[in-house]
């Protein structure tokens, strides 16, 4: 049970070190310890303060392509989602509210779809139907995209917050539906 929870839970925790130490203290299975340790080592590379992994030339629904470096100088709130993901779509109204509240602040709202190429038209249609704002991008290779792998994303929705220099503030940022997100933005003086 400990392993089953840790396998995915470690990718969502905001307290990586204590989470990992708790798992190590409770696990007696060497294979499980190795797997969770490997996950822990990857997740340390996307800990707060680390430079964010990059995405390059992702298709932008508004036309052309967008890379993470295009957004330097702004805070960046990234929503990793897909059209088939119910919990992702449930966040849309909340994300729209947050975007509206902060539309004139130094923050870019970026939604990265991990839909497969065969669902490209479905992605474009949903953007229109739901009147999605922000910067709407499609990952270059769904869940196999290097950016997604670098963040060790095993489930969506996933929210990431970066500072204006491109460093990670939180690779498990609160969802738009969570009031803690506004508190985080307030501490950043947005």
Image (tube, grey):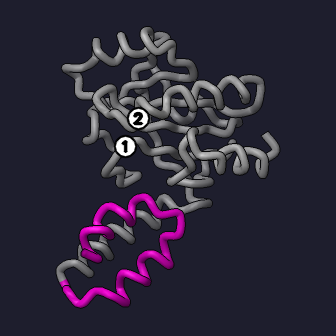
Q: Which mark is residue 88?
A: 2
Horizontally, is 181 left or right of 83 in the view? right
Horizontally, is 103 left or right of 32 in the view? right
In the picture, residue 169 is in which quadrant? bottom right
Crowding near pointer 1: few (<14 within 10 Å), some, many (20+)? some
> Percent x, y for residue 119?
24, 20
SS for callout 1 = loop
Q: Quadrant of the N terminus?
A: bottom left
Q: Residue furthest right?
A: 189
Q: Is residue 160 above or below residue 38?
A: above
On whether residue 12 falls in the magenta region, the answer is yes
Q: Which residue in the protein does label 1 denote?
A: 156
Q: Which mark is residue 94?
A: none
- What's the magenta bit mostly, secondary-structure-wise? helix
- N-term mark: 1 or 2: 2
Residue appearing at x 46%, y 67% in the figure:
44
Q: Which residues are magenta?
A: 1-30
> Percent x, y for residue 141?
27, 33
Proximity of marks 1 and 2: CB atoms separated by less than 8 Å: yes
- Viewer-side residue, 189 vs 146: 189
């Amino acid at each position: 049970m400990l392993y089953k929870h840790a396998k995915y839970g470690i990718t969502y925790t905001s307290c990586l070190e204590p989470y990992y130490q708790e798992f190590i203290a409770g696990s007696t299975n060497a294979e499980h310890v190795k797997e969770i340790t490997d996950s822990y080592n990857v997740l340390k590379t996307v800990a707060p303060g680390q430079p964010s992994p990059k995405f390059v030339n992702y298709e932008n629904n508004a036309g052309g392509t967008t890379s993470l470096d295009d957004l330097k100088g702004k805070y960046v709130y990234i929503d990793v989602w897909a059209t088939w993901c119910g919990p992702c779509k449930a966040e849309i109204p909340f994300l729209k509210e947050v975007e509206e509240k902060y539309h004139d602040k130094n923050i870019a709202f970026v939604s990265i779809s991990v839909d497969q190429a065969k669902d490209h038209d479905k992605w474009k249609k949903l953007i229109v139907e739901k009147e999605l704002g922000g910067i709407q991008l499609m990952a270059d290779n769904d869940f196999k995209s290097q950016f997604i792998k670098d963040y060790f994303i095993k489930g969506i929705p996933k929210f990431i917050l970066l500072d204006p220099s491109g460093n990670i503030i939180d690779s498990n940022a609160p969802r738009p539906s969570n009031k803690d997100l506004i508190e985080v933005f307030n501490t950043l003086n947005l």
